[in-house]
Image (tube, grey):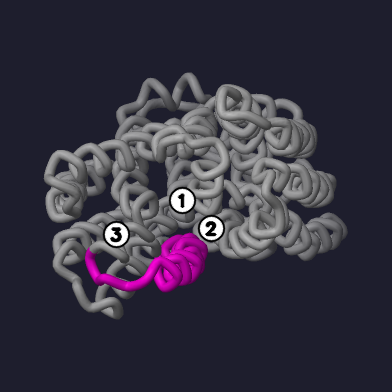
Amino acid sequence: MAHSAPVSASTRGRWGLVGAAVLVQLALGAVYAWSVFNKPLQQQFGWSKTEAVLPFEVAIGTIFIGSLIGGRIQDRRGPRPVALGGGVLYGIGNILASLTSSADQLWLLVLTYGVLGGIGLGAVYITPIAMLAKWFPDRRGLITGIAVAGFGFGAVIVAPVAKALLNGTSDKTSVFLPLGIAYLIAVLLGASFFRNPPRGYQVPGFTPAVGGRAVAGTRVYTLGEALRTRQWYLLTAILTLNVACGIALISQASDAAEAITGVSAASAATLVGVLGLFNGAGRVAWAWLSDRISRMTAFLGMLLLQAICFFILPHATAFAVFAVLAALVYLAYGGGFGTMPATAADYFGTPNAGAVYGAMIVAWSIGGVVGPLVTAVLYEASGNSYTLPFTVIAVVALVALVLPPITRLPTQPGRPRPHNEVTGP
């Protein structure tokens, strides 16, 4: 009994870490507000649409570098130094982006916002996910969903702020300075509270499930061991395809709403802001649901839902119908990010969650580049119509349905999973 008292106290303190994690993710999620910069940058510097979106694509494309490196360091040193270091890189990348002052300095914006910001974002992003999976073995799906929900909501908060700043100045890149400072403060403040549970940490009354719906494996894997299992690649493929489908719409949501339904640009922009709420909500809702119906059943639901919606979307000329379908796609897109961290922890354990799931973030980079690229190419190839690209995306989602049923817990030898799974600093 003497031992249980301090453990219980540590358990109660874990909810404060959730608040710190959400604050950090709100700052990181600002990356999804990039669309508000597209037209202002095109107008100021005469860049094409492809050039204006390049910094965002590079940021998404380099996230996995930060998550891979940061995840490995976190498993050895703990979450706080990784989150603080990544936060500095992310904030400084945005701040330095404000130095872009001429049309021939696109490279500078790509280097600062894209490369520095993207790598820093990836390093910070992975830390609260891996950390909270260790603190909440009893609510793993729900809590990792909440941990990344802030990321989905970040753009909802930042987009109107950035738009107001852009409207108030002729030097559009100067907006990155105050935004970068705000991101830096938010991440450093939240990350300063990050810590792993103490050795021997247990949740009173909780015993890992060995049957039923949400079942965890019985072994702990290092990154190298996980990479030698087929399950790691199957999970990464599921996440890649879920990302590619969802972000295909996210990259075109405003333009598609105008083209398909005929609404004004202002109405389309308002819709995009509202859809961001569904991105965040999906991360919590699907993760919570996966605790109850199983992880793979949840992914089947996400992919099937996207397939149905994408088949209908090109023909949804009524704005209300289009908005509902788009919201469902955003829910499923966010759901993948909310559910996969818990899935990886179930399959490979939490002691090396930073490295194992950090490596899986390559799915975000691949899907985040391929989805929008394929959609844009097919859109132009079909004479500026969304019927072909959205139908192709629907088929991709249908084909992806074969993956969850064959993705079972790994059976290769690893070391036995301890009851509490907590190791490291």
Instruction: Identify which residue is drawn at 30% across, 80% down.
Output: 320
The amino acid on which the numbered mark 2 sits, given as a three-letter code, is Gly
Q: Quadrant of the C terminus?
A: top right
Looking at the image, can residue 335 be seen?
A: yes
How many angstroms separate mark 1 from mark 3 (CA)? 24 Å
Looking at the image, can residue 285 be seen?
A: no
Vertical relation: 216 (above or below) 328: above
Q: Say which mark, if any, is on residue 337.
A: 1
Start-end of magenta stretch: 260-289
Q: Which residue is mark 3?
A: 256
Q: Are marks 1 and 2 in contact (CB under 8 Å)?
A: yes
Vertical relation: 376 (above or below) 334: above
How many angstroms separate mark 3 from mark 2 (CA)? 21 Å
The amino acid on which the numbered mark 1 sits, given as a three-letter code, is Phe
Q: Say which mark, if any, is on residue 152.
A: 2
Vertical relation: 70 (above or below) 321: above
The amino acid on which the numbered mark 3 sits, given as a three-letter code, is Ala
At numbered mark 2, what does the secondary structure look like: helix, strand or loop?
Answer: helix
First along the sequence among labels 1 and 3: 3
Q: Are marks 3 and 2 in contact (CB under 8 Å)?
A: no
Instruction: Identify which residue is drawn at 34% across, 57% down.
Output: 255
First along the sequence among labels 3 and 2: 2
Instruction: Identify which residue is drawn at 49% across, 46% down.
Output: 38
- In percent of width and height, residue 183 lies at 74, 48
Q: Who is closer to the viewer here, 347 or 111?
A: 111
At numbered mark 3, what does the secondary structure look like: helix, strand or loop?
Answer: helix
Instruction: Indicate left or right for 226 with 304 as reference.
Output: right
- In percent of width and height, residue 332 lies at 36, 60
